[in-house]
Image: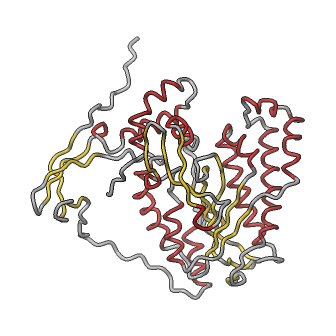
């Protein structure tokens, strides 16, 4: 694996301890765990393996990864495995990319209520697509949706939005044929936007009524029903941003695109430029500009960079990739076979497992390119301790 000159892990290792001390009492357990995992990733603290090249005899140590889903270095393998699982589900039709975004005032309260509002965002976006697609005035079909949550903007600000990948068509309401959408056009964006706004606000009001929302700081007054109603009133009058991109250039392009979106974290190591006395400098894209002027650099103080990165730590157990319609996990294989039949495609056949599959080289020598074999296990610097025993 190619190592970037500067990584998020380097910033955390050099400045994380001092910043945690400054922020004592203001960080969640989840944020502290993410920092610890990234700091320890691929270093002696997690242990590893000593390798020996079968060609030139060179030895080296490969340290273990943290496998934390917020770690920029641990997502490539996870994305590759996920895409392999999804490859068999691609259909020979156009695919569309639809993005659902909430207004800035909603983003502010979403940070204090991540699990609740992120879940509402998923449900409202999926319901909007499934409902409008099933309407005979538009497509009149049952569709499938893969939805991915992103909580960040290019400058690491809190900007929750949902990326949806949708086939350009679906199963007719009577289940007897495949209904394709018009070439180059999926569903009307304005209709999607208005229904999305209504569904989201309905669920948000229900969550407030049921006491599922918490408010702190300048938003503390929103705990009262009247204040919350006044807060939502102007949001009913504005257009919520729903953006539909043109279709992908074939199913293969969908996989390439998904590989960049499904397991992306707040910032990739490749965007980092420098970390010095001025702060952390990184590349970002200004979507309000056009052409080459979109690509800019930004410098944040080191503490502010760490703070913005940790804004995007997800609640424990929260799934940021979800499937709906005929992509839903329940009955996915049955639906896939049914759709392939409607499209006059041969059924997918899983090849029998190889009784003795060839073992691919997991580690490759940097000197000669030959495979490397594990000759020794390197224990972690700090072994995990057993829980204390409570004696009566």
| Nearer to me, 194 or 319 | 194
Residue 56 horizontal side relative to residue 345, left or right: left
Colour scheme used in the picture?
A: secondary structure
* Residue at 78 percent of width and 52 percent of height: 200
| Nearer to me, 132 or 352 | 132
* Residue at 11 percent of width and 63 percent of height: 55
Q: Residue 184 at what x, y percent from top left?
A: 69, 81
Q: Residue 354 at what x, y percent from top left?
A: 29, 72
Q: Residue 163 at what x, y percent from top left?
A: 63, 61
Residue 246 drawn above or below residue 78: below
User: Where the C terminus falls, by quadrant?
Assistant: top left
Residue 85 horizontal side relative to residue 104, left or right: left
User: Where the N terminus falls, by quadrant?
Assistant: bottom left
* Residue at 89 percent of width and 40 percent of height: 230
Q: Residue furthest top?
A: 392
Residue 45 horizontal side relative to residue 235, left or right: left
How many numbered marks have been drawn onto this rendered protein structure?
0
Residue 362 horizontal side relative to residue 29, left or right: left
Residue 326 is drawn in which quadrant? bottom right
Q: Residue furthest bottom?
A: 344
* Residue at 52 percent of width and 75 percent of height: 253
Q: Residue 310 at what x, y percent from top left?
A: 54, 40
């Amino acid at each position: 694996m190619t190592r970037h000159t500067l990584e998020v892990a380097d910033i955390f290792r050099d400045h994380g301890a001092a910043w945690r001390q400054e922020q004592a009492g203001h960080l969640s357990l989840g944020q502290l765990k993410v920092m610890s995992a990234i700091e320890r990733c691929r270093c002696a603290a997690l242990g590893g393996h000593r390798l020996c090249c079968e060609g030139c005899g060179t030895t080296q140590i490969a340290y273990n990864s943290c496998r934390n889903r917020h770690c920029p270095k641990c997502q490539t393998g996870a994305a590759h495995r996920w895409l392999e699982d999804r490859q068999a589900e691609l259909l020979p039709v156009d695919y569309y990319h639809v993005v659902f975004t909430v207004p800035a005032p909603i983003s502010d309260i979403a940070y204090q209520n991540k699990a609740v509002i992120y879940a509402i965002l998923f449900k409202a976006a999926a319901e909007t697509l499934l409902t409008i697609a099933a309407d005979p005035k538009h497509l009149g079909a049952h569709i499938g949706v893969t939805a991915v949550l992103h909580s960040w903007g290019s400058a690491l600000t809190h900007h929750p939005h949902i990326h949806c990948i949708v086939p350009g068509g679906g199963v007719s309401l009577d289940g007897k044929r495949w209904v394709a959408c018009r070439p180059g056009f999926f569903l009307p964006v304005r209709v999607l936007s208005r229904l999305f706004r209504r569904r989201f606000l309905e669920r948000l009001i229900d969550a407030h009524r049921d006491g599922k929302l918490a408010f702190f700081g300048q938003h503390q007054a929103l705990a009262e029903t009247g204040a919350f109603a006044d807060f939502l009133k102007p949001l009913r009058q504005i257009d919520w941003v729903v953006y539909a991109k043109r279709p992908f250039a074939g199913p293969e392009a969908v996989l390439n695109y998904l590989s960049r979106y499904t397991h992306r974290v707040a910032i990739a190591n490749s965007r980092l430029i420098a970390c010095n006395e001025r702060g952390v400098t990184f590349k970002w894209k200004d979507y309000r500009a056009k052409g080459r002027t979109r690509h800019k650099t930004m410098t944040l103080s080191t503490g502010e960079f760490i703070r913005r990165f940790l804004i995007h730590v997800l609640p424990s157990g929260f799934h940021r990739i979800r499937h709906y319609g005929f992509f839903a996990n329940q009955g996915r294989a049955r639906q896939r076979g049914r759709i392939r039949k409607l499209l006059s495609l041969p059924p997918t056949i899983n090849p029998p497992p190889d009784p003795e599959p060839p073992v691919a080289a997991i580690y490759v020598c940097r000197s000669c390119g030959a495979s490397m074999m594990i000759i020794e296990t390197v224990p972690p610097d700090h072994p995990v301790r057993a829980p204390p025993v409570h004696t009566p």
